[in-house]
Image (tube, grey):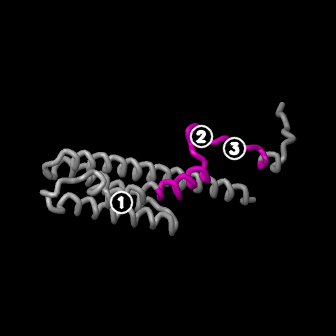
Amino acid sequence: MSTISTRTSSDLERSPVPSRIGRVEGPGAKGLHDVPLSVLMMLAGLWLFICMWALGYPDTLANDPHLVEMGAGVIVFLAGLVRLSRARGKATDLLVLAVGVGLILSGFFGDFGAAVIRWDQVTTGCVLALLGLVGVMLAERAGSAKREGSAQRDAKDAP
């Protein structure tokens, strides 16, 4: 004997589809990926501009370490600004991640002679690498949630 179900297709459409465990839903991940992360990147870029004066780099080094940090600061600040002004993608996050890794390497391999410079570059590089990594992860989760949502809408619209 077979059992006949009385559920209609409209009942199935109303029932919630459980999300996977640990999955950040699209709007939440997209919201985190937009403004807060961009502002943190811009603040890190500004820090790279003023760290020479704030930490009191020795005057005997000329401007070599500060030129490295200013170049990284320009890239990071502009990446944060771009993230605020246009559709987000992983490219700016990967760029910030690469700049962070470059600052870490510069801190270890650039022999500027002052410990304060080394630790500032390594610390700021770690922060930038973390921001870039978080941005890439949030962009991936927001994109996958968006793809899943559109697939569910397409399945719902199909006859």
Residue 125 is left or right of residue 17, and the answer is left
* Residue 8: mark: none
Q: Is residue 29 left or right of residue 92?
A: right
Residue bearing mark 3: 17
Residue 81 in the image: state x and y as whole percent.
45, 66
User: As rendered, which of 80 and 14 lies closer to the eye?
Assistant: 80
Say which amino acid is labelled 2. Answer: Arg
In the rendered image, which residue does mark 1 sit on?
Answer: 95
Q: Give how far apart the Cα atoms at labels 2 and 1 are.
A: 30 Å
Disc 1 residue crowd, few under 14, some 14–19, many 20+, Cα 10 Å = some
Q: Quadrant location of the N terminus?
A: top right
| Residue topped by disc 2 | 20
Where residue 40 appears, x then y in whole percent? 45, 54
Which residue extends farthest right? Answer: 6
- Label 1 is placed on what type of residue? Leu
Where residue 92 sits, quadrant-wise, is: bottom left
Q: Which residues are magenta?
A: 13-39
Q: Nearer the viewer, mark 3 or mark 1?
A: 1
- First in residue order: circle 3 vs circle 1: 3
Helix, strand or loop under label 3: loop
The answer to if 68 sits in the magenta stretch is: no
